[in-house]
Image (cartoon, coloured by chain):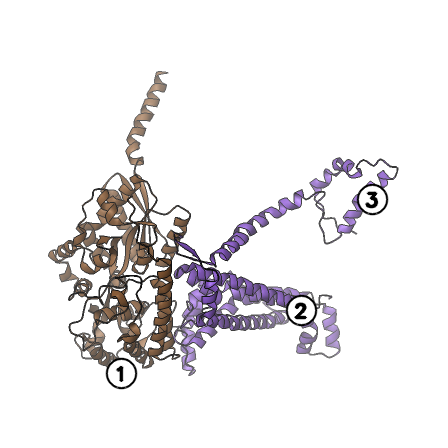
Chain colours: A brown, B purple
Amino acid sequence: MGRKVAFIAALFGALALVGPAQARVEVQWWHAMSGVLGDRLNELVEKFNKSQDKYTVVAVAKGNYDEVTNGVIAAYRAKRPPEMVQIAERGYMTMLLSGAIVPVQDLVEQKGYKIDFSDFIKPVASFWSYKGRMSAMPFNSSTPIFWYNKDHFQKAGFDKPAETWQELEKQLYAIKSKGISECGTVLPGDFYWSLLENYSAINNQPYGTLANGFDGLGTEFVYNKTKVVSQVARLKKWLDDGVMQIAGQGFSPEQLFTSGRCSTFVNSTASHGNIERNATINWSATFLPHESDIDPPLNSTIGGGAIWVMKGHTPERYEAVAAFLDFVAQPETQVWWHGATGYVPATNRAYALARERGYYKDHPTREIAVLQLSRGTPNENSRGFRFGNFVQTMLAQRQEVEAVFAGQKQPQQAMDDAVKRGNEILRQFEKLNAGKTPETERP
Amino acid sequence: MTLRLSIPWRDARAPVLQPRHGGGVPSAAAGSSRRSGKTQRREEAGLKRANFGDGPGLPTLLLLPQLLILLFFFFIPSLRALMQSVLLSDPFGTSVQFVWFDNFRTLLASSDYRQSIAMTFWFTVAQNVLTLGSALVLAFATDRIVRGRSVYRTMILLPYAIAPAIAGILWAFLFNPAVGPLAQVLHRLGIVWDPNLNPTDALILVTLAASWKHICYDYIFLVVGLLAVPVSLMEAAAVDGAGLIRRFVSIALPMLGPTIFFLTVMNFIYGFFETFAIIDAVTKGGPAGATNILVYKVFVDGFVNLDLGSSAAQSVLLMSFALICTLLQFRYFDRKVNYGV
């Protein structure tokens, strides 16, 4: 009898010890990071989980951005959404007007955390906020930069790539004609982002009306009346002359660059991790080129993703979410993430910290994105792009550009058609979301 | 001898059930009629119908899993698709508008969709001809191969074991204009080849990949079909002086009629619905929408563009197309097929 009591007492004692560990609140975070970036993200989550004993964040890789979006839509409709989800910048309007999210600034403030939202670097803050309040937590912000093969440029007698498209064109043709490499550049897989949208921002060209969609749902595309048309014509010419190649399915543009086959390529600053690991060439990077008659060039805009908080969870879980978001916003976390991946630091303090530590002395190319994003004074044309059904309009545009590449359409015709198709898609979004203001439900 | 297809444990219980058979008619003939009724029915059942005893209980039970699967994976989704096709809704389903047939109207008005229809038609027909043609040749050749026949057959059947997406990547790589070995061969032959740029090249590439993946399916059926052709007939024809090709065209081919008909239907269904993974891996519907077959467009519009209404309307149309095609095939081609072998 005495033994039994002792045993039960011991059991309870043991349970009491195990208790706190079991009481950790678990929240899910669905994300779209794979490869090196996925490993880094897991490290980040691990760091958070180890930093305290109340909450556990479980990071779940759900495929690419489209697959994550689909996954969360299906889960939301089945009333079992994850607490947090990483969504690409193109999904901003869809998420904002979905009625399925909790704005992060509301959540964080309500849970008593002091994140200085005014400290986020400008293009990042303005993109992810609505009416001055942050809708989603900026997480992986990137911008396209210009990567080049140093040896190829030196062999052709140049120090580095020129700053303007006109000069750069001469260089690429020289490299090709001297037989230094097979192709001067390779078409980026997301050329619509880097070579059309960011091109418009940097060269101060309007892309759509109403400040590229920032001022309302009635926005319309106008890029068929800007330099974008001649940009498409330029790409077509390069393609015809063999100065530019298309990597094609099953093969990435990055591989053509890192293997030394093509001399330059335009890609997100986030490819630092991969390129550092895979490249066998002597590479470097610089700012994206601009048109010769544009002075000064403006800032580029961000891409990448942010963490959205989904509706419909218990207060304890939102405690955990707020704690995690606070952790993500810490300068230390940001600096670490910036260094580990190549994404830009989201806050000014994090950027200053990285500078202070002399990080950019050893890694000069890592600073390009930040400098390019904060160059000049952002105006209506360079603040960013905020269109409904953005993925759909982008695919229509992409198809039209491909028709130019295939020789089926003239650039002007193709851009006119792309704008026409895009505007129809925008009208559908407007019709669906007429009179809607994003929900600001308190968690 | 009659083949009995009854189920043993059901039979064992038969005597217990028998009294119910006679009902309340205790006539002199009752005994004999009862017996003969049972056996007679079994004889009627003959070769084709299995005898599951009395009542609908067991057959229903056996059909139930299949019916449930159909219900959950076909009927309910089809109904949802029908409903969704007349709605305009945001992906999260928080705001929904009823728009009548707007989705269909927009769809049929878009040149994009019409291009996709035409493209799908050519793709499916070309794939069908290519697959069936090569499978026929390969199947007929099987008979002529004496040494290493099993190796030959295995080699042909192997692609069936490869996942479509992987097969697609393989083809995309082999014919990649920058690095693909086969593309280099084409270039050396002076053929300008670039499926990333040229819509025709892209279409040829996906057609080849899709056919290659499906040849083995047709091949299996055709080999079996050819085995059913009586050797005596072939020998008789040979004795009469008919050559190889003559024997194939005049004897083997007509006897393969039912098989070929069946395979044509299956190939159409394959081309319509199952080539999705190959398109995704080889071209992603590009360039310029040149390989955007209907089923791939449904996927892109629904799951990438999140345009659920249009995607649902497309799947409803696709389903009707497939239905009409199959009906036409059965109505017109079926008559020309001779089953009385």
Q: Which residue is mark 1?
A: A177
Q: Which residue is mark 2?
A: B257
Front label number (2 vs 1): 2
Within 10 Å of disc 3 (Cα), the crowding (few <14, some 14-19, many 20+) is: few
Observer-nearest of A421 and A22: A421
Query: Which residue is at the far top?
Result: A1
Q: Is residue A361 left or right of residue A136?
A: left
Q: Position of residue A150 (x, y in %)?
A: 20, 72
Quick check: A368 above or below A96? below
Amino acid at dot 1? Ser
Q: CA gap, disc 3 to disc 1?
A: 96 Å
Query: Which residue is at the far left?
Result: A356
Where residue B25 is drawn, which disc sits there?
A: none
Q: CA gap, disc 2 to disc 3?
A: 41 Å
Look at the numbered discs 2 and 1 and tell me whether their residues touch, using CB distance below 8 Å: no
Q: Quadrant of the C terminus of chain B?
A: bottom right
Where residue B36 is drawn, which disc sits there?
A: 3
Amino acid at dot 2? Gly
Q: Is residue B102 left or right of residue A375?
A: right
Label 3 marks a residue whose chain is B
Amino acid at dot 3? Ser
Q: Position of residue A366 (x, y in %)?
A: 19, 62
